[in-house]
Image: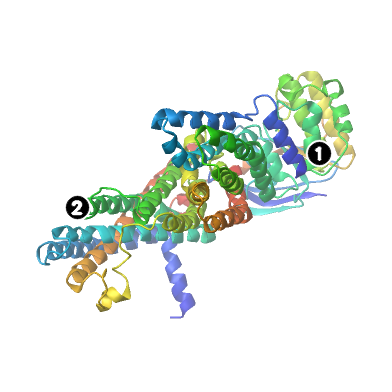
Amino acid sequence: MIALLLRDLKLAFRAGGGFGLGLAFFLIVTVLVPFSVGPQSSLLSTIAPGVLWLGALLACLLSLDRLLALDWEDGSLDLLATAPLPLESVVSIKALAHWLTTGLPLVLAAPFLGVLLNLPAPGFFWLVISLLIGTPAMSVIGTFGAALTVGLKRGGLLLSLLVLPLYVPTLIFGAEVARRGATGMETQTPLLMLAGITAATIALLPFASAAVLRINLR
Amino acid sequence: MSIAAKANALWEYANPRKFLATSERVMPFFWVTSLACIVVGLVWGFFFTPDDYKQGSTVKIIYLHVPAALMAINCWLMMLATSLVWLVRRHHVSALAARAAAPIGIVMTLIALATGAIWGQPMWGTWWAWDPRLTSFLILFLFYLGYVALWEAIEDPDTAADLTSVLCLVGSVFALLSRYAVNFWNQGLHQGASVMRAAAVTGADTEEKVSNIYFYPLLLCIIGFVLLFIALVLYRTGTEIRARRIKALLARERVNG
Amino acid sequence: MTLTVTDLAIARGGVPVLEGLSFALHPGKALILRGPNGIGKTTLLRTLAGLQPPLTGQIEGAEDQIAYASHSDGLKPTLTVVENLTFWASVFGTNGIQTALDAFALNELSDRHAGNLSAGQKRRLGLARMLVTGRPIWMLDEPTVSLDKNAVQMFADAVRAHLGQGGSALIATHIDLGLDGEVLDVGPNKAKPKPIDDFDGGFL
């Protein structure tokens, strides 16, 4: 299992691995926001938590179609499926690798981008906390979407269509934490809900992902 | 007849041929009664009920809005049930019924959203508000779109049935989660679900209940929509079965060279 | 471990392709799988490897015994030869990739990235991967594609060595590998179409 994780991390960091693409996308989206809504700092600081959450979500989405497709194309998935490793672990490891290479960098970059959007001072802590708790769920849900569409030739767009509605609860609670935090409101309830959703998806969704992957490998 | 025997009798309809024969026999009944219910309900509702003292004649869009909204949700529940049957018992008719129902659900969701917007404009002064109920229906619409798109994208019918069934199960959980999330996120303008509450039926005096004058034609419309939905699902499932059969025949030709 | 297949029927994309297939693969033996294109050789190998369920019939002695090599090699172009092999060795819980490197003369390529190998070298690496799985039954699908004469010989030697150690192999190939294995021709097992009146059958 650790071998698979290490391999995926190694692949992500080597040439053409796509590491940093999501991060660059996150940066660009954030930079484009003031161009589209105007430079008033009061407006920017109001929308900053939501915009940063949406940007992180889209950046996460961007790399999903590579998550399983590459292993599918070169036959690695066939071999992994016949290996003594349960497919549930394989998809969980894949999701973890995706989070480490995409989600975690987004979490770490978010405060710097928050500066660009005049995020109010108390908001930084809650933005990072909410993203830290919310992004793992996005990787796990994304892995499910990737497993659903892995056999399709042009699955990328379909993958977005399938995954985005599944992101709704995470986005709502996550952005709510960040927004409430930025305005100094109580954040406990949405934070607990967000953590609950993340915990439940991590615990249960890999079974669904493995099931659909098995169907796709037939 | 024992319960077990009855259950077995139900599974006989999993045979496509038996399903087609039976559905063709009962379909005319569903078409006629559904049309009758809807026509009578709408005429009764539109012309023979008074205008609401607050909402005026706009209230009458309720005869389309509420049944469509109910069917939009129940259609997904039906798809969930048939998906489960497919996953557990591998009856092709069940998977095809789920596939056949999805576009009907989309149309019902659209009707509910459109009539809601038309109703909301004079009442709330806006075509659209990010009210929890409206938002939930919009999210439901997205789930329907994804479901249909997945069916369309996969060539092998059994694989498509398997994958869409799992998506339907997972989607149901997330749709429910979204519903709670959206409720939490915005408390909203929309009144509560007033039709099916016991208070509305018994006529207990609450602010939001649908009064009896509107209730009976509305009930008729709801029954009409349910019957219409059944007729449409039977009809479309029949079409799906025939399309599958043609595909199977073509594949057979190819194999035989 | 003997692999026993009894009255197996398999389908590709929901369409039955082979039926009534029975054979046994004993330790130390190779079976050469023959049959016209499209008959379902790949489907058979995937079914035996456990990647898809059979329509009917029994497969015994396959559980966790099979190493399956498809048309594609499962190699990562940005990993070196050693890294690729080490990864598969640890996934299958074995160690020691040296035997595999030796068997396919990959020693001098060991630090090259798999992406920089020629097609034949890649193929050799893909087959070396069979060795590091430590599984006794090999399922090989057209293993000699893009191999030159020398490499084919190398491959045949590796299979022979594997058989000598009590392993077995089921190989779908059109060329003569010079292995003393029986030939399993699946041509006569082509699935006959069910009568169309049998609705559920015709429906599939």
In the image, taking residue B108 as reference, residue A186 lies left or right, namely right
Q: Position of residue C49 (x, y in %)?
A: 70, 45
Q: Residues within 10 Å of mark 2 (few under 14, many from 20)?
A: few
How far is the residue under mark 1 from the one under mark 2? 70 Å
**Marks 1 and 2: which is nearer the front?**
2
* Viewer-closest of B218 and A84: B218
Question: Circle 2 — which element?
Answer: helix
- The residue where tag 2 is placed is B122
Q: Chain of mark 1?
A: C
Q: Chain of mark 2?
A: B
Question: Is B233 located above or below residue B194 in the figure?
Answer: above
**Which residue has dot 1 on it?**
C89
Residue B97: mark in rendering: none
- Do callouts 1 and 2 point to residues on the same chain? no
Q: Is residue B110 left or right of residue C91?
A: left
Q: Position of residue B55 (x, y in %)?
A: 17, 61
Q: Is residue B38 above or below residue C181?
A: below
The three-letter amino acid code for the residue at tag 2 is Pro
